[in-house]
Amino acid sequence: MANETKRNLLDFSLWIAGLLAGMVLLAHEAMAGGSLATPPNAAWKAECESCHIAYPPQLLPAQAWRRMMSQLDRHFGADASVEAAAAAEITAYLERHAGTGKRVAGAGSSLRITETPWFVREHDEVALKNAARCAACHTLAEQGDFSERNIRLPR
Amino acid sequence: MVLAVLAAASFPVLAQAPVPSPQRGEMFFKSTHGNDWSCASCHTENPLAPGKHVKTGKAIAPLAPAANPRRFTDAAAVEKWFRRNCNDVLGRACTAQEKGDVTQYLMSLK
């Protein structure tokens, strides 16, 4: 009887430990990137994707997106201006899904996702050839899937 | 002769001889215009082939209608891209003649 109680207790603690480990993994995946999918927005996708993937809104804070959208005619060295109506819609969408907290902490005035401390930390073990091309390694980046299991490093 | 000069003087539009030229368009397309990029930087020297954004590496579908029938079918899209890309390549808007030349050049490719 005492032995059985002990075993049940052991089973239970193993189960709890497994659960905790799973939660830690999930939390890590979520913080690392994991799914950065947002509800689809046709204007956002079409306009951003005509030159690069539509980078996930969560990767910059709202005020950075607002500033970027206000100077699209000088967008990292290129004119990416859009019609006023589309610009307003895209700005609202980016603001609604913009990043908060640790992931965008320290996002500087350069407005570059690749210069946020979070991005630098996440990529400190790889040599990025062209940091604008998420999909070169994150094979499902276009769908907002940045999970570790879908990374394939080119050789 | 006198009549032609008179006409050109009274109607400056005629003086510009806005007949599109595919040869001029090709030169324009493949040259830089004071900035780092030419049209060909992203669209390549062969507009029948797919291009690649020189900075982001994003694939660009061919620009010549013979290779990509959807090109030049949406006037708003055409104007949007001329606006953006002329600003990148020339640092100003393209003239009607420049746009006409380039369009003629792209449509002449088979």
Image: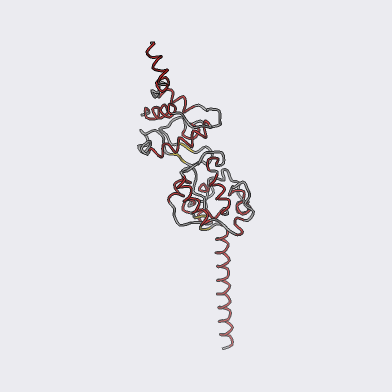
| Rendered location of residue A9, percent (x, y) | 58, 81
Q: Residue farthest to the front?
A: B10
Q: Residue farthest to the top?
A: B1
The color scheme shown is: secondary structure
Q: Quick one: A53 or B33, which is closer to the camera? A: B33
| Rendered location of residue B7, percent (x, y) | 38, 17
Is A82 left, or right, of B4 in this rendering? right
The residue at 56%/78% (across/down) is A12
Q: Residue farthest to the bottom?
A: A1
| Rendered location of residue B109, percent (x, y) | 38, 28
| Rendered location of residue B87, percent (x, y) | 51, 34
> Above or below — where is B18 with respect to B78?
above
- State which quarter of the image contains the C terminus of chain B: top left
Residue A155 seen in the current view: no
The residue at 51%/32% (across/down) is B92
Is B69 left, or right, of A102 in this rendering? left
Q: Quick one: A46 or A127, which is closer to the camera? A: A46
Residue A106 seen in the current view: yes
- State which quarter of the image contains the N terminus of chain B: top left
Numbered-mark total = 0
